[in-house]
Amino acid sequence: MKISEHAYAVTGFGYVPPWEVNAGFVTGDSRTLIVDAGPGRFAAQTLYGYARAVRERNALFVVNTERHLDHVAGNGYFRSMGVELYGHPSINRRQEDLEADIEEMNAAVPDPFRRGRREAALFFRGTALANPDRFIDRDTDMDLGDCPVHILMTPGHTASNLSVFVPSDGVLFSGDCVVADYFPNLGDSSSDWRMWLDSLDHIEALRPDILVPGHGDVLTGGRVRDGIERMRVILEKSIEKGAPAWDAA
């Protein structure tokens, strides 16, 4: 859906139930930045098609907001289409990582016949992992033509987390630095909850009008600040307890 003059949100790609994941893209006069590659080939094809439909002749490139597979598993499709991939240097995923996720999903299939046929693998048919070939390890400005964007370092959920800010439109794609509706994933071994709080401060200081979270509804108006504050409360209580604060959601 179009959320501003230059920005589009593509929401609700399925992944590990009950999780879905968001992506999107930002268009300028000459370049289109796709924010996250989606959780597999089918999602990547959808993103590619939408981006081409909006600005057919624009050069395309992708930025991954983090290392988790729901954000990067579509990279292989984009690489096959000649699209450059940008992301944090620590993003280094292997096909074995995807296979492990497929096995976990398949084990949760309740019907033994379907489980035996490994039907969970159909969701990822044709998905080949690829890692970024252009690295972002500091705040970086990019020009899409008439639309500058800022790529921001917002680590905490993982060390690889980036956000994308479109200042002319007041739109921010946060990746999983902010999630709406869901309880955030605090269990990654690379999580640094105090650094995550600093990243929330960084995002809030930009005063975005529209925030596309990594998961959940797009936030607008007063819900942007409320969504950031919800994340902050969860993190602060988790730091205090030394464990995920389920009662803070």
Image (tube, rainbow, N blue to C red):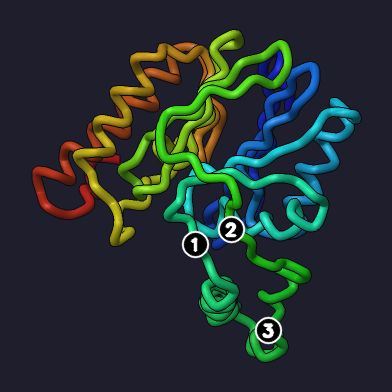
Q: Secondary structure at mark 1?
A: loop
Measuring from the top left, give residue 21's x and y in whole percent. Answer: 58, 47
Q: Secondary structure at mark 2?
A: loop
The CA distance from mark 1 to mark 2 is: 6 Å
Residue type (three-letter) at the residue carrying disc 3: Arg
Residue 136's place in the image compared with 227, above or below, is below
Relative to 230, 56 lies left or right: right
Q: Which residue is mark 3?
A: 118
Visible residue check, residue 22 = no
Dot 1, how many residues are within 10 Å of its Cα: few (below 14), some (14-19), or many (20+)?
few
Task: Say if mark 1 contacts mark 2, CB within 8 Å.
Answer: yes
Query: Which residue sits furthest left?
Result: 240
Residue type (three-letter) at the residue carrying disc 1: Asn
Q: Which residue is mark 1?
A: 92
The CA distance from mark 1 to mark 3 is: 26 Å
Measuring from the top left, give residue 27's x and y in whole percent. Answer: 74, 23
Q: Which residue is mark 2?
A: 131
Residue 188's place in the image compared with 134, above or below, is below
